[in-house]
Amino acid sequence: MNKLKKAPKHISKFTKKPPKQQTKTSLNEEPKHFMRQTISTIYKTLKSSSWEQAQHQLSKLPIKWDSFTINQILKTHPPMDKAWLFFNWVSSNSPNFKHDQYTYTTMMDIFGEANRVSSMKYLFNQMQLKGIRIDAVTYTTLLHWVSRNGDVNEASRVWSEMKDKGFTPSVVSYTAYMKVLFDNGKVVEGGEVYKEMIRDGVAPNCVTYTVLMEFLVGSGKYEETLEIFSKMQEAGVKPDKAACNILIEKCCKAREMRMINRILQYMKENGLVLRYPVFMQAFQTFEVTGESNILLKQVNPHISLEDSSMEPIIDNVTDKSFTLDTGLLLLLLKKQNLLAVDNLLVGLTGQHAILDSLTISAIIEVNCDRSRPEGALSALEYSVKMGISLERTAYLVLIGILIRSNIFEKVVEIVKENIKAGYALGLYTAALLIYRLGRARRPTCAAKFFSLLPDDQRGTATYTALVSVYFSAGAADKAVKIFQNMQKKGNHPSLGTYNVLIGGLEKSSRFSEAEIFRKAKMSLLKNGCFPDTEAAFDRNICDLLFSSELVPREINSER
């Protein structure tokens, strides 16, 4: 291993801040405070409101949209769909503004984090087509997420292209490329990249060392790992919480107790803690090996009150037929003791005790955040039995985790409860959900979902989403019939609609029909459409969802 070098301060974000003009007022704290508040308000709006509501509120803000402001908003990482809608909205509603390398790169980062690699590449291609400056940070963003996606060939291509263009790789670039090489068994190549990094004077950071140690632990080279663990500290780079969690998780699988205890001792001395799943894995490893877990508990006092210690409280409450208050449930939520929460909700259901909407919504959101759909559904079942309407965000996060967990049969039920509670999904959310059900090959669920929508949300976007569902299911006749029904209802097709029709019909080898719709699309491009605002908004939603580059390519790759 080469001599470890002291790492300089390193900015962990991929995207750089665009240059901000210095003015007299920018030196004043009051305008800075105003902008921080404004950016925070916009983030909350994008996160919690439907796009229709968010768009209305955004249009009323008394601010000038510039690259710096928009980049800061995107860096708060609002939900991906809202970020993309905002990205397009701001350029179409601000004639004097054009997206630059900073806003494009940040939007690429958002797509990459959401595993929408094809969408990220689309934005990169748009930058090239529009002549927008591309720098090392843009390439690093692309390389990082391509690497995280495990595409070693594409990562190698991006790496070569970046160097051919004359850009100097950063420590983030080197680290991302090394990881994808190590993860794909290209050990020699990964070692060469590390040596090149040292030769070029790029100092490794904590993530670089973590990648090296993770590879060494996976190869059973524990002594070498501990050597790096010590020498990186001598070089001025302290292992962080993420590094310690990764190493302990790896060591638990190999039951390498000496290294586990060494890292735990370091964590104790530096005030670091384990994530709950890693703690439980370590706890089980100590149980299996028969070693003392005192050090493990000392490092993680925040999760020392786990299931076994909460059982006497539950039993005591049950014995006394005592109605549990909100405070106890919130305490258990804070302690992340979700199994106890599940049991308490069962007891409350039997006692017909009614909790408030905020508490039940919090239980659902915490369970979803911890990837426990069964716990979230249990809380939903309680709310339905007790006649409690949840907060809007609770319904949305529950729908999201069920789709990610492939539990589609419950989605329609939750949508019913959402509508019953008086919440509108919004055109974009409704169309996106139908599209996701289609990707999962659930045309029946998608049709039921569509039937629940009020008339004002059965527009071009949602009809087009349903058309895409049937094409994905291989039912081209049904897809065309849905399109015809859409026209009968007075909903005009948009460019996105034609993209879906052309792609679906061509996949079904119905080329003559596809050609008819291609001509209709060209006519629409030439003549324009929809003077009224509502139709224009519906069309924009449809086009954003079913852009010829962003969505159909993903639909086709699913087949």
Image (cartoon, rainbow, N blue to C red):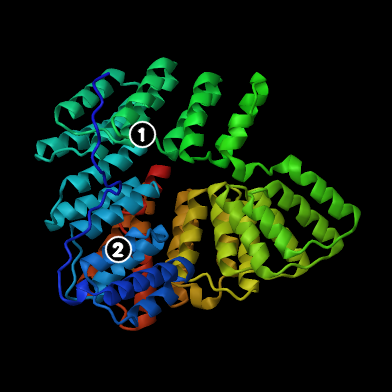
Identify the amino acid type marked 2.
Answer: Gln
Q: Quadrant of the image for the N terminus?
A: top left
Q: Position of residue 421 (x, y in %)?
A: 64, 73
Left or right, 165 with respect to 234, comes to left
From the viewer's perspective, is residue 153 above or below residue 23?
above
| Outermost residue toward the right in this view | 320
Q: Position of residue 41 (x, y in %)?
A: 40, 72
State the residue in front, 257 or 90: 257
Identify the amino acid type marked 1.
Answer: Gly
Does dot 2 land on a helix, a strand or a loop? helix
Identify the residue at image location x=81%, y=66%: 353
Q: Is residue 497 visible?
A: no
Left or right, 351 with respect to 335, comes to right
Real-space CA distance between mark 1 and mark 2, rounded to the nearest whole angstrom: 29 Å
State the residue in front, 116 or 427: 116
Q: Which label number is shown at residue 72?
A: 2
Q: Which residue is mark 1?
A: 150
Identify the residue at image location x=9%, y=39%: 166
Q: Position of residue 466 (x, y in %)?
A: 48, 61
Foreground mark, 1 or 2, reads 2
Does dot 1 land on a helix, a strand or a loop? loop
Q: Position of residue 556 (x, y in %)?
A: 38, 46
Left or right, 418 with respect to 386, comes to left
Identify the residue at image location x=23%, y=29%: 5
User: Mark 1 or 2 closer to N-term?
Assistant: 2
